[in-house]
Amino acid sequence: MQKTFNYKDKTINSGDGTIICGIVNVTPDSFSDGGRWYSTDKAVAHALDLIKQGAGMLDIGGESTRPGSTPVDAQEEIDRIVPVIRELKQRTDVPLSIDTWKASVAKAAIKAGADIINDITGFLGDPGMAKVVGASDAGAILMFNPVIARPDHPGSKIFPSFGGEGVFSQEEIEKMSTLPIQESMRFYLSRCVQFAHEGGVDDDRIMLDPGIGFGLTKRENLLLIRDLHILRDMGYCTFVGVSRKRFIVNILEEAGFNLDPETEVGHENRDLGSAALTAIAAMLGADVIRVHTVSHHRMPSVIGNAVRFSDSMKDLNLKQYSTKNSDQG
């Protein structure tokens, strides 16, 4: 069944295929490209380059949320991203998603022209976030955050705090810690949607994210990707971020590939491995995929979408390869 996601006066339709969302980190310490675009001019230039590569959305962040990162004051986050938003709104109509879980940052971003708030806590980290988005016409991406859902899990303890204290009872936290990860995600996101509704955000302005890489084990990451249909079955469009995640590196290292980021081959392999998951996620119905390098991901998304929409493909009889172009005959 086709799903829709509305922001301002625009609509994303799931039947139109996967959108590639380029990452613009205006930070000095993000896990893979921190500091490279850490100025308004560099961030804007990078964003425009991502659009040229084929990005249909941009996700702008002013705070790193990687394991071991240092939290950023809300005003510092605002100072980093607002000039970038204002400049880009003058130069492109590509939707701008803002990666923040703080209500004051979201409010400033929306005032500057942001189209979508991408909250990695799903509105649970800051009690004021749902009302801020609800009072606007911006869309919202609500992410399953295992760090909040399972604070005592070994994978959660290496991340900074994302708020959310008191949202779940101790009994509910224990429940999410013992449920299969898919059911924990469903339980968590149902609470996020409840908060969204209470803040005035209707279903047609909500997109869901399975939270790949946030305090999850290797197996759990893979299960949530495999069962991406759960989010669609809940009634929403889906947003997925798998680019350069650690579990991809682990899979390829175990298979004997060079993943050393200090080498050209190793760095390239991280993006190629990520792109393989983009093809899979697109095939499984991801509506938006968040990536670092758009050029690596466009082709895999096209192939994934071809499989996803195979029922509507033409029954085309393909020509034989010429001997000049192939030795297959």
Image (cartoon, rainbow, N blue to C red):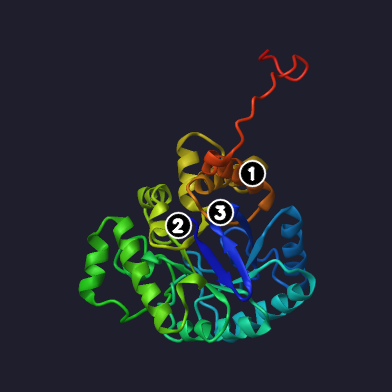
- Left or right: residue 192 compared with residue 179: right
Name the residue located 55 percent from the left edge and 52 percent from the top edge. Answer: 244
Give the residue at the far left of this rendering: 171
Badge 3 marks a residue whose secondary structure is helix
Contact between labelled residues 1 and 3, with CB atoms less than 8 Å apart:
no
Instruction: Evaluate whether residue 27 shows in this view.
Output: no
Residue wearing tag 3? 15
User: Which of labels 3 and 1 is toward the front?
Assistant: 3
Q: CA distance from mark 3 to mark 1?
A: 31 Å
- Left or right: residue 75 compared with residue 195: right
For residue 236, above or below residue 326: below
Q: CA distance from mark 1 to mark 2?
A: 21 Å
The C terminus lies in which quarter of the figure?
Answer: top right
Contact between labelled residues 3 and 2, with CB atoms less than 8 Å apart:
no
Badge 1 marks a residue whose secondary structure is helix
Looking at the rendering, which quadrant does residue 20 occupy?
Answer: bottom right
Please provide percent x and percent y for residue 184: 30, 62
Contact between labelled residues 2 and 1, with CB atoms less than 8 Å apart:
no
Please provide percent x and percent y for residue 221: 40, 52
Q: Earlier in the sequence, mark 3 or mark 1?
A: 3
For residue 14, above or below residue 6: above
Q: Earlier in the sequence, mark 1 or mark 2?
A: 2
Looking at the rendering, which quadrant does residue 63 occupy?
Answer: bottom right
What amino acid is labelled 3 in the image? Gly
Instruction: Evaluate whether residue 142 shows in this view.
Output: yes
Please provide percent x and percent y for residue 140: 52, 73
What amino acid is labelled 2 in the image? Ile
User: Which of labels 2 and 3 is toward the front?
Assistant: 3
What amino acid is labelled 1 in the image? Glu
Which label number is shown at residue 212? 2
Residue wearing tag 1? 268
Q: Earlier in the sequence, mark 2 or mark 3?
A: 3
